[in-house]
Amino acid sequence: MEKVSKETCKKRLKGIDDALYAIGGKWKLKIIIALIEGYTRFNEMQRTIGISAKMLSLELKELELNGFLTREVHPGPPVVVEYKVTEYSDSLQEVLQVLSNWGEKHREKIRQERSGK
Amino acid sequence: MEKVSKETCKKRLKGIDDALYAIGGKWKLKIIIALIEGYTRFNEMQRTIGISAKMLSLELKELELNGFLTREVHPGPPVVVEYKVTEYSDSLQEVLQVLSNWGEKHREKIRQERSGK
DNA sequence: TTCAGTAGTTAACTAAAGGTTAGTAGTAAC
DNA sequence: GTTACTACTAACCTTTAGTTAACTACTGAA
């Protein structure tokens, strides 16, 4: 009789590890949300998310490389660059939903604890 | 007719923000998994997760402060310290499940892409 | 008595993440 | 002709995250 379920644990840890590798960090999920909600332009996203140009540029490159979005340059003039989520990003919808909901509830809990004191 | 749903977007971004504030970073979710799966001791968790003593110590303090776990010292001799998840951590089960599953599938996808070349 | 284990802490350091400011090159409005 | 917007990039700097090794203090086994 073990208290610890080593196999399940290892499996879950590995899954989390792989997920964090692809979509961990401060910005990736936020960028994907912005794209899913219909934002396509660089400056637009920068303002919406509250990210610096440098970070946005870096993260967009990584996300493109990993198949989460595409970058389309429409030669102008004026030149317009559009970022769009790929179908693969749809596989993240559930993650986004669950995580965002949890965050909302957590914020509510914290708020109540503070006001309750 | 807007392509962008600003309200939904803002709400989801805020939710993600709150979630990442509490459980973002490389270690917090992993520690919670280890605890949920039944690990209770410091060195045990260190080995299972592959985290340094310093980081584990720091993260455990934060998680305790935020109500995700309790620290029980059983005065010995020998002194034994037990970490246990609180009920509140159960609210993370769905997050853990969804994220870990996504990670697994993502790894599988990457693996296939590499072998397919 | 020496070696190993428990539960950490501390110091010294490196690496990664992120911010700020400035600048580029083009368009377009005032 | 000056200001502003778009989509960035480069240099510089700070902060946060993380590693390694040494050390504490106590227990128990060889």
Image (tube, coloured by chain):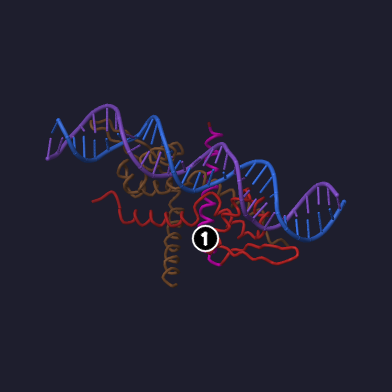
Chain colours: A brown, B red, C purple, D blue
Query: Residue C11's x, y, as percent?
Result: 61, 46
Which residue is at the front of the view, C27 or B5? C27
The answer to if A114 sits in the magenta stretch is no
Query: Residue B63's x, y, as percent?
Result: 55, 59
- Identity of the residue drawn at 52% across and 41% down: B109
Indicate the secondary structure of the residue bearing disc 1: helix
- Left/right of residue D3 with respect to residue B94 in the rendered view: left
Which residue is at the front of the view, B4 or B79? B79
Q: Is residue B87 above or below residue D4?
A: below
Residue A8: image quadrant is bottom right
Number of marks drawn? 1
Query: Residue A90's x, y, as percent?
Result: 42, 48
Q: Which chain does the numbered disc 1 sit on?
A: B
Query: How dense is the environment of label 1, judged by Cα within 10 Å: few (below 14), some, or many (20 and up)?
Result: some
The outermost residue toward the bottom is: A116
Which residue is at the front of the view, A58 or B110? A58
- Identity of the residue drawn at 51% across and 54% down: B98
- Identity of the residue drawn at 24% across and 31% down: A76
Query: Residue B101's x, y, as percent?
Result: 54, 51
- Identity of the residue drawn at 66% across and 60% down: B40
Task: Give the magenta part as a residue range.
Answer: B87-116
**Three-letter residue code for mark 1:** Leu
Main SS of the magenta part reads: helix
Q: Which residue is mark 1?
A: B92
- Left/right of residue A20 with respect to residue A3 in the rendered view: left
